[in-house]
Image (cartoon, grey):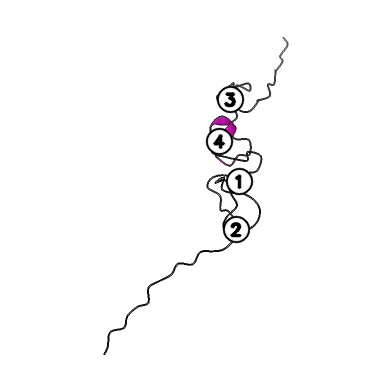
Amino acid sequence: MWWFSIVFTEIPYDGIDQDLDGADLVDQDGDGEPSVLAWGRDCNDRDPTVHPRARDVPGDGRDSDCDGSDGPRFRLLRLQRPRMRRPS
């Protein structure tokens, strides 16, 4: 008796499950976010450090959190109202 196996390569984002694992490949980098090509929110599906939940480092020239721009160059300081002391 002869046994043979056919290995199918998955083509991402086409809506077809070629490798018969039950789902189409929509997250190539494995960061847990589907690619924008598969109606997800991951703007760079080849880099696992870039996804909507990532921390965007200001001024590094990369849009790490997929919001359309690099993080702010300057940190915004939160101003606090001065506390009034009660006279003793």
Mark earlier in primary sequence (4, 3) = 3
Q: Secondary structure at mark 1?
A: loop
Q: Main secondary structure of the magenta part?
A: loop
* Count of residue discs: 4
Q: Mark 2 or mark 4, which is nearer to you?
A: 2
Q: Is residue 40 located in the magenta-colored stretch of the structure?
A: yes
Q: Is residue 26 above or below residue 56?
A: above
Foreground residue, 62 or 55? 62
Which residue: 65% across, 56% down?
60
Q: Secondary structure at mark 3?
A: loop
Mark earlier in primary sequence (2, 4) = 4
The magenta stretch is 27-44
Q: Which residue is mark 3?
A: 21
Q: Is residue 51 above or below residue 20?
A: below
User: How many residues crowd around disc 1 within 10 Å: few (fewer than 14), some, or many (20 or more)?
Assistant: many
Q: Mark 2 or mark 1, which is nearer to you?
A: 2
Q: Which residue is mark 4?
A: 34
The amino acid on which the numbered mark 3 sits, given as a three-letter code, is Asp
